[in-house]
Amino acid sequence: MRNPLLALVLFLSLGAQAQQTAKPVLHGKHWVAITGKPLAATAGAMMFQKGGNAVDASCAMLAATATMWDVLSWGGETQALIYDPRAGKVVGINALGVAPTGATVDFFKGKGMQYPPEFGPLAAVTPGTPGGLLVMLAEYGKLSLADVLAPAIQMAEEGYPIEAQAANSIEKNKKRLKEWRYSREVFLTHPGQQREAPAAGEVFRQPDLAAMLKKLVEAERLALKRGKSRKEAIQAAYDRFYKGDIAQEFVRAVKEEGGLITLEDLARWKVRIEEPLKTDYKGIEVYKLTTWTQSPVLLQALNILETVDVKSMGYNSSRYIHALYQAMNLSFADRDFYYGDPYFPPAEPVRGLLSKDYAKARAKLINWEKNDPGVVPGDPYPFQGETNPFLPMLEQWNPQAPEKKVADTAQAQRDYERTFYAGTTSVQAADAEGWVVSITPSGGWIPAVIAGRTGVGLSQRMQSFVLEASEGPYNVLEPGKRPRVTLTPSLALKGGKPFLSFAVQGGDSQDQNLLQFFLNVVEFGMNVQEASEAANINSFQMRASFGKHENKPGKVLLSQDVPPWVRSELKRMGYELSFEERTSGPINAIFFDREHGTFWGGSSHHGEDYGIAW
């Protein structure tokens, strides 16, 4: 090519086409490992190099993220979907802790509380992540517990260079951390100095946590030495955490700090392997966990949106945004009323909620000219041939959370949005054997109460309960019960084979972002990285699952790139608009390329999430 100007133009044009996303797609033939931090993704890659499968890798990433306080810790909760290629089916992992003995409605009302607290020892449910990791590994993994915990133990014992996000969160929350003896000992590495938290890049050590993790490995080793099987040896580690010396120190420390968890609470709790829920969207089977999470709202929203032609509306047009907002509001209104722990009565009306006919009835309620701030829960019971036992309560439902209007101050707005997006990371892994894992672990984020010499940070999940049946009759606090949480991994199959694995952090925004990610791929033809980075919207009309459980009907978060004519149209339709530079949420995902037999990994540029593939 002799024309240098033409050559330059062609070079720039090709360069622009090649780099259409902030991060490249991850291409892999053998495996993919993606999670919330680069170091944790490396831990997953290490397991694949040891000959492990996607379950081993995901457990190592879970252990690493919990050790790194990636908006969770070891005392939190783990929610997972696993595709088992041996059985050709998806299974759910329920490793959510429960309200402890003494955690009653009267107890918290007696303290003048409208909800269990956001922070502190009384915010804790029993730890679920250790049990969830151990059960997943025992049932579906290949490697030993010693192998899988090795990266986390090394990080805790020798230390790792702490990243700015966690270090700055410690500094920001140091006043609260000083309230708890073991928390200030672990987190405030420079007591008395102007900055008491570690600096970004400083080596951060957790010797108590390392010792606890070594005890789990020791329990496995001793059991193997006694001739126990691999699964029995991992069970020995489980028993040591929930019934042995680790449990005793955990409970002692919780009591010292004023918490309620007892040895009996730990011993009675167990991980449940469940049948997940699913719906069919245009030939794609989408799997979610059941009503102890908010997961079914995505299935309900897909059922509603299947009744209209969303693709013809155009990506992020005013009509498309309006359709999303209304479908999500109808689904989340049902979440706020009907979702709760399925192992406690009353039984949630799941069959009715996921009925295609119920979705058609809900879709008919959409006003296509303006937002409806008065969306209320529907009545799914007739769609499963039953009568609603809570009709009088349903008829009294107030679309505005009672006496929970967000104060019109900048600080109140910041606090509200902080709780709305609280907590969580995500873990995604897949391998050439066919194993696929999608996890949304959470709980025990900074500022966390550390339970004595276990090094374990307590969960803050109790706050997701309500204390009044009128605010959600299926989610009223009881000892031994799981709160209805926001944590919501996703798997989709096409033709009976894995199609998409996807998850995101972000509290009440999770299924909102995941719904749009899925539609980005299925309806708008985006690849997995484009869909992870694409601008999403967020509704604030549903009741927050944290803090004071406020809501803001009609408020919508948009990308700053939304054009003026779309903004104007949405304002005319009654929306209150707010804007941010990035609204995708930190989505992590894997697409399964059946044509070429490869994986496409996506990791949003919204946060510090990172992936590795081979």
Image (tube, rainbow, N blue to C red):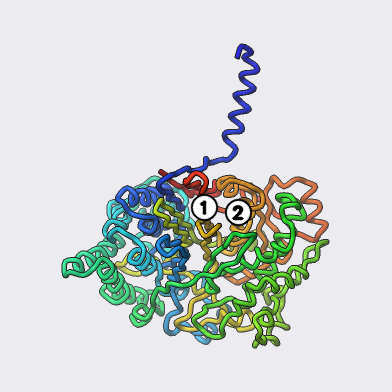
Query: Residue flagged by tag 1: what amino acid is it?
Result: Ala
Report x, y in % for residue 373. Answer: 75, 68
Are the residues flagged by discs 1 and 2 in contact, CB closer than 8 Å? yes
When the figure is inspected, residue 401 is found, relative to residue 18, above or below; the finding is below
Report x, y in % for residue 18. Answer: 57, 33
- Which quadrant holds the C terminus? top left
Q: Which mark is residue 589?
A: 1
Image quarter of residue 380: bottom right
Q: Which mark is residue 517?
A: 2
Instruction: Identify the residue at image location x=53%, y=61%.
Output: 490
Q: Is residue 366 left or right of residue 284?
A: right
Q: Is residue 175 left or right of residue 510?
A: left
What is the CA distance from the residue labelled 1 to the residue labelled 2? 9 Å
SS assignment at label 1: strand
Instruction: Identify the residue at image location x=35%, y=57%.
Output: 56
Q: Is residue 48 left or right of residue 229?
A: right
SS assignment at label 2: helix
Indicate which disc, 1 or 2, sits on the residue closer to the N terminus. Answer: 2
When the figure is inspected, residue 457 is found, relative to residue 38, above or below; the finding is below
- Which quadrant holds the N terminus? top right
